[in-house]
Image: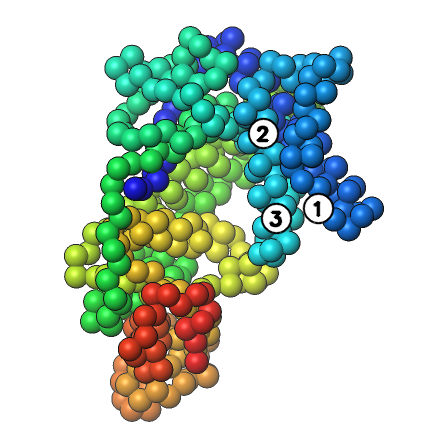
Amino acid sequence: MRLKAYKYRLYPNKKQQILLSKHFGACRWLYNYALAKKIEYYTKKKKTLSRFEIQKELVGMKKQEETSWLKEINSQSLQASLANLDKAYTQFFRKKKRFPKFKSKKDKQSVQFLQKTNVDFENNKLYVMKFREGIKAKFHREFDGKIKTATISRTPTGKYFVSILVEENIDIPKKLKPKIDKALGIDLGIKSFLVTSENQKFDNPKYLKESLKQLKKEQKKLSRKKKGSNNRNKQKIKVAKIYEKITNQRKDFLHKVSRQLIDENQINTYCIENLNVKGMMKNHRLAQSISDVGWNMFVSFLSYKAEWVGKNILQIGRFESSSKTCNVCGKVNQNLTLKDREWVCECDAKHDRDYLAACNIRDFAFDKQNIGQDVSKFTLGEICH
């Protein structure tokens, strides 16, 4: 069985937009209310407040005049909001992820529907709880499988989308044992977005840089608008549309590159370096370029596509000297700077730094100490010198 998400554009009418806004607002309010209670409870008792304790309060809240508007909202969507908070709260303590933040009505809004979701491909209608008439949708592709969840979202530009998680009756192929002769080393960069150990290069499209002039112009206009005015709200949408276009362009590029790599029939393993993106962002000269390139998103896309076809992803520990180490004699050239893209080793071997890094990342993942071991089971950072 395979889980796959399908995203479609929605076109709700005015009445449905109002009801969706109530769902967004109620789920956001409950999320913030529960987060505040969890923080207060932990501060006083040094214990975690269960979401089920907060969930019990919902029955009483719906009877109170102040919060009686919760009756209009699908109860399972409210429970899903609490479950999402509980997951984020638990991950912070167990996996050291970022502490959950209070949600704002200015950000992207979403609501989750857990049951009784149906789609009518013929009439282009989506049916979820509380929306009996069905919401008009653009189903550009059909799916076959059991619907698990449906998440309706509204972007800052006012567009509505639904992401439907489907359980498809497709068996995921069993992964083959990684072999170096069928492995591809991948070096991610800024000048060239990606270089492989087969010397295949993908240029960095730099979508943010291309739109930066227009973005600055519109942001300058926004800063001059009076706060709370209709003109300011209109200008906010203009700025949001530019950001939305950049995001869509970047996602489209990353999907195409990851798909092209996965479709390589002779490859069953992809070796990638675990980059410290957060640390690299502290370099103010490179921060904008790093945020624009989307390395983490690419690794995510490549990983789930590889999982679907039974291929391996090996993420090695940070290999700072990957482009400075000669793969012929093993000597490390510490005198190289960022501007040096090519260099010649003492053994007379000529190297392109990006191509060399990709080869070294591949070879590093299959180091001699790992021969005979199933490296596909190694966790992040375990495959290191």
Q: Name the residue under label 2.
A: 79
Cβ atoms under marks 3 and 1 closer than 8 Å: yes
Cα separation between marks 2 and 3: 16 Å
The amino acid type of the residue labelled 2 equals: Gln
Crowdedness of circle 1 by 10 Å Cα count: few (<14), some, many (20+)? some
Residue 116: quarter of image: top left
223 w.r.t. 299: above or below: above
> If you read the primary sequence from the N terminus, does the residue marked by circle 1 or circle 2 appear first?
1
The mark found on residue 75 in the picture is: none
Crowdedness of circle 2 by 10 Å Cα count: few (<14), some, many (20+)? many
Image quadrant in which the N terminus is located: top left
For residue 90, say whether it is visible: yes
> If you read the primary sequence from the N terminus, does the residue marked by circle 3 or circle 1 appear first?
1
Q: Mark 1 points at which residue?
A: 48
Dot 1: what SS? loop
Residue lying furthest bottom: 347
45 w.r.t. 57: above or below: below
Residue placed at 24% from the left, 72% from the top? 180
Which one is in front, 33 or 145?
145
> If you read the primary sequence from the N terminus, does the residue marked by circle 2 or circle 3 appear first?
2
Q: Where does residue 119 sit, x and y in percent of width and height?
A: 34, 20
Cβ atoms under marks 1 and 2 closer than 8 Å: no
The amino acid type of the residue labelled 3 equals: Thr
183 w.r.t. 115: above or below: below
Residue 40: quarter of image: top right
Residue lying furthest left: 265
The mark found on residue 90 in the picture is: 3
